[in-house]
Amino acid sequence: MIIFVYACDLKGAIGKDGDLPWRQSTDLQHFKRITLGGTIVMGRKTWDSLPGKLPGRRSIVMSRTPREDIEVMSYQEIKDLAAEQDIYIIGGGEIYRLFIEDVKELYRTIIQTEIQDADTFAPDIEDLGFHIIGERVVEAGDKDQYNMVFQHFIR
């Protein structure tokens, strides 16, 4: 099954200048709880924004060029793998758009801010048949910039 995991601002922004436009320790812990022990898939730009492989997860990058530093797969290879196990798509915008028709479950964190000059956005999920099955408002902790809302959807 293909599962999306992302954080966005109030207008759907997920990135600015090749990075997350906020620092939210609580959301990163939430992301880790969801994906730990699983297989995460990302685009090259998302991979480049990370400090390296995330511990406790199989990392796969979608890239047009072969890489020595990380496992690379095509869209079809990832779809085939998703028939056997859960796959967590973690970004970026192009990869979300590529898999939007295939996703069955979605974890979204809404960061309670609006980022100026954001350059990467999550897909609009409003008319795609998703149903919210859980929502939790979380106040900013000591290592968070903003309050947030954790949401869980299925379709």
Image (spheres, rainbow, N blue to C red):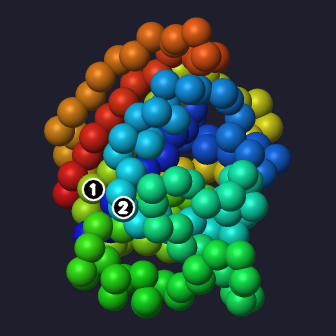
Give the CA separation, mark 2 to mark 1. 14 Å
The percent coordinates of residue 36 (x first, y second) are 39, 51
Image quarter (top left, top right, bottom left or bottom right) of the C terminus: bottom left
The percent coordinates of residue 54 (x first, y second) are 56, 54
The percent coordinates of residue 46 (x first, y second) are 67, 59
Kindly identify the residue that appears in the image at 74 percent across and 45 percent down: 19
> Left or right: 10 with respect to 35?
right
Q: Is residue 126 above or below residue 73?
A: above
Kindly identify the residue that appears in the image at 71 percent across and 89 percent down: 66
Label ID, residue 38: 2
Q: Residues within 10 Å of mark 2 (few under 14, many from 20)?
A: some
> Disc 1 residue type?
Glu
Which image quadrant for residue 135?
A: top left
> Disc 2 residue type?
Gly
Which image quadrant for residue 80?
A: bottom left
Image quarter (top left, top right, bottom left or bottom right) of the N terminus: bottom left
Residue tagged 1:
105
Q: Visible in this render: residue 94?
A: no
Kindly identify the residue that appears in the image at 44 percent across and 42 percent down: 31
Q: Residues within 10 Å of mark 1 (few under 14, many from 20)?
A: some
Q: Circle 2 — which element?
A: loop
Q: Visible in this render: residue 59?
A: yes
